[in-house]
Image (cartoon, rainbow, N blue to C red):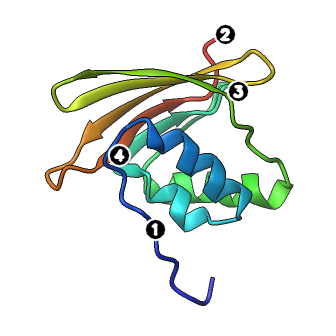
Amino acid sequence: MNKAIKREPVYDPQDLERLLVARQNAGDVDGMVALFEPDAVIDCGDGRLVRGLEAIRSFYVETVASGRKFAFGEQRPALICGDLALTSTRLPDGDVTSEVARRQSDGTWLWVIDRYSVS
């Protein structure tokens, strides 16, 4: 993208899923990657683990290029314990995602672990 995109900081772990879907639907791969810690891991659900921001970026470049669109689902309330939060969403197809987010030193939240489907 040629022009800088202003992205809202995430001060509530409940906002991570909404922002991931919105940014994916907008084709904002860098914005998607910005929701993860540097050593984060994604379980893609097909036996593949994607670890680190470069690999996550490549994964999302492929996803956006494929034309596949993430769907908004029914988000469950986050379970927060100190600086960790467990988030999950039931997708329209019945699959359930689960994620672990960590509060950063500036008070924002980033995902550390993202599992696409636990069903």
What type is the residue that disc 3 sits on?
Answer: Asp
Q: CA distance from mark 3 to mark 1?
A: 30 Å
27 in relation to 32, above or below: below
Q: Quadrant of residue 44?
A: top right
How many residues crowd around disc 4 within 10 Å: few (fewer than 14), some, or many (20 or more)? many
The disc, 1 or 4, on the residue closer to the chain's N-terminal end is: 1
Which secondary structure, mark 1? loop
How many residues crowd around disc 2 within 10 Å: few (fewer than 14), some, or many (20 or more)? few
> Which residue is label 2 attached to?
119
> Which residue is label 4 attached to?
110
How many residues crowd around disc 1 within 10 Å: few (fewer than 14), some, or many (20 or more)? few
> Which residue is label 1 attached to?
7
Q: Nearer the viewer, residue 102 or 65?
A: 102
What type is the residue that disc 1 sits on?
Answer: Arg
Residue 14 placement, left or right of 22:
left
Give percent across and percent down for residue 28: 63, 66
> Which residue is label 3 attached to?
46
Give percent across and percent down for residue 30: 54, 66
